[in-house]
Image (cartoon, rainbow, N blue to C red):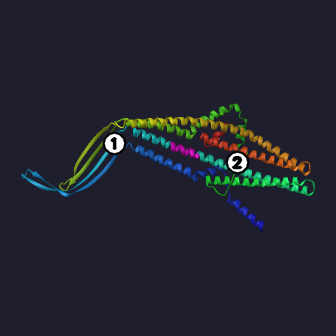
């Protein structure tokens, strides 16, 4: 009955774990990631700012109305030429309606450059959204790969534990039969205990990797599809065959791609343009401003039968004189900001070149290491089984058997780490290049 219950629990658990591939994980992250959602809202905000700046070119208009009651009332008199006598009157209130329209004709270029800066800022926000998407996709892939790697290392540790248990059982039988010493039996028991510790540590690493993946993608109860070596076999073969003498040629090709696609580099260039326009805009503080305005008012009091209209058209110009030095300081500070951004751009270019070269060397050396580790696993497996057979016959010692087991386990660790290290480096290089389709990278080799 207990076995049946365990089987049912296992079936339910497996059924509740959804099979997830990398694309599904990335789509989930794009839907649920908070930083990406905030960046999308920033784009909307920048679009509204650009529209607001453009609206500044249009005239402004204001409607006004007023009602005035005189307390006390205004007493007055006027001469009536028809009756040749004076007429007394009392003004009790006054009602007025008006409209004023104003159109800036020239403001030293401030409106124009302000609008251009808003457009550049909008482009920066769009580039940040693209960079956030590429970074998020790369991070999801890295976490996805990390989960798979931790799972394989966990499986290897369990395999190592099974081997050490099998060796301990064999040593126990030989010890009880008097074919080996208690010391050799204790060595086998110690190796088994160490393997159990490794299993616990590997399981912890695997669970922590799953937690990080869940936090990034919002997925729970998942079973990730394994990325088989055959998927990237052709890419890794090409990497292995790359001559190190030609790595600079490859690096230059990748640098050209980064110059076109890297969003951080694009934003530095746009920020430089904004700084240049800010300098021109601050220089406008030394230029005159010209405005055209029209205003009219309709008013009547209790003494009038109809509204009276008064209007005016005004063309005004003003020339800033003081503060002169403050405006000069503003211009100089804008020039300093531009210089800082130029230095930042040079630093960014150097960093990109370093990261690209480093990634290339890692990919090429990693591909060679992977094939060496595959061969090492084959040799370690053959060695272990030979030593195991010799140990059964009493020819090999427990120390030799344990050493062969550890060599086999380490060889498998190295193979797994080499393979997933290539995938992680590939993902990081795509982020540096500013591309989201790995086919673009694979085709370069």
Q: Residue furthest top?
A: 245
Image x and y of residue 259, in percent: 57, 36
Residue at image position (30%, 47%) is 100
Q: Bin the neighbour count of mark 1 within 10 Å (Cα to Cα): few under 14, some 14-19, many 20 and up.
A: some
In the visual, does 368 lie left or right of 336?
A: right
Q: Bin the neighbour count of mark 2 within 10 Å (Cα to Cα): few under 14, some 14-19, many 20 and up.
A: some
Which residue has dot 1 on it? 103
In the visual, does 275 lie left or right of 290?
A: right
Image x and y of residue 321, in percent: 34, 36
Residue 72 location, quadrant: bottom left
In the visual, does 110 lie left or right of 136?
A: left
First in sequence: mark 2 vs mark 1:
1
Q: Residue furthest right?
A: 178
Q: Which residues are magenta?
A: 124-133
Quadrant, the C terminus: top right
Tell me if I can see residue 188 in this picture: yes
- Does 417 lie within the magenta span? no
Q: CA distance from mark 2 to mark 1?
A: 64 Å
Image x and y of residue 436, in percent: 61, 43
Tell me if I can see residue 443 in this picture: no
Disc 2 + disc 1, Cβ < 8 Å: no
Predominant SS of the magenta segment:
helix
In the visual, does 339 lie left or right of 287?
A: right
- Does 126 lie within the magenta span? yes
Residue at image position (65%, 43%) is 427
Secondary structure under the numbered disc 2 in the rendered image: loop
Residue at image position (58%, 51%) is 30
Q: Residue furthest front?
A: 183
Which residue has dot 2 on it? 227
Quadrant, the N terminus: bottom right
Above or below residue 324? Residue 140 is: below
Give the label on residue 299, or none.
Answer: none
């Amino acid at each position: 009955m207990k076995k049946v219950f365990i089987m049912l629990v296992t079936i339910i658990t497996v059924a509740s774990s959804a099979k997830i591939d990398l694309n599904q994980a990335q789509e989930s992250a794009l839907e649920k990631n908070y930083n990406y959602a905030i960046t999308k809202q920033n784009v909307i905000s920048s679009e509204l700012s650009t529209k607001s700046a453009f609206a500044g070119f249009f005239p402004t208009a204001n409607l006004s109305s007023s009602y005035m009651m005189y307390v006390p009332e205004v007493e007055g008199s006027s001469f009536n030429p028809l009756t040749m006598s004076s007429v007394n009157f009392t003004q009790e209130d006054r009602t007025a309606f008006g409209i004023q329209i104003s159109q800036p004709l020239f403001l030293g270029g401030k409106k124009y450059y302000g609008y251009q800066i808003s457009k550049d800022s909008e482009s920066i926000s769009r580039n940040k959204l693209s960079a956030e998407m590429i970074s998020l996709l790369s991070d999801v892939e890295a976490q996805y790969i990390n989960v798979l790697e931790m799972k394989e290392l966990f499986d290897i540790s369990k395999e190592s534990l099974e081997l050490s248990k099998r060796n301990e059982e064999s040593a126990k039988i030989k010890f009880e039969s008097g074919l080996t010493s208690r010391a050799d039996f204790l060595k086998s028991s110690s190796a088994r205990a160490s393997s159990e510790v490794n299993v616990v540590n590997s399981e912890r690493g695997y669970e922590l990797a799953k937690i990080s993946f869940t936090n990034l993608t919002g997925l729970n109860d998942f079973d990730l599809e394994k990325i088989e070596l055959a998927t990237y076999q052709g890419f890794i073969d090409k990497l292995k065959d790359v001559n190190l003498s030609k790595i600079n040629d490859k690096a230059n090709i990748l640098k050209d791609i980064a110059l076109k696609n890297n969003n951080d580099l694009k934003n530095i260039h746009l920020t430089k343009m904004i700084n240049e326009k800010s300098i021109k805009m601050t220089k406008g503080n030394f230029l005159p401003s010209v405005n055209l305005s029209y205003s009219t008012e309709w008013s009547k009091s209790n003494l009038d039968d109809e509204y009276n209209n008064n209007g005016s058209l005004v063309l005004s110009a003003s020339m800033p004189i003081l503060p002169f030095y403050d405006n000069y300081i503003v211009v100089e500070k804008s020039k300093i900001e531009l210089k800082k951004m130029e230095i930042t751009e040079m630093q960014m270019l150097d960093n990109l070149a370093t990261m690209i070269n480093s990634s290339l060397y890692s990919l090429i050396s990693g591909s060679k290491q992977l094939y060496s580790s595959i061969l090492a696993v084959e040799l370690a497996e053959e060695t272990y089984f030979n030593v195991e057979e010799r140990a059964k016959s009493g020819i090999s010692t427990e120390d030799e058997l344990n050493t062969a087991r550890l060599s086999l386990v380490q060889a498998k660790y190295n193979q797994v780490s080499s393979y997933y290290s290539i995938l992680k480096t590939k993902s990081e290089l795509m982020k540096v290049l500013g591309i989201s389709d790995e086919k673009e990278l694979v085709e370069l080799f």
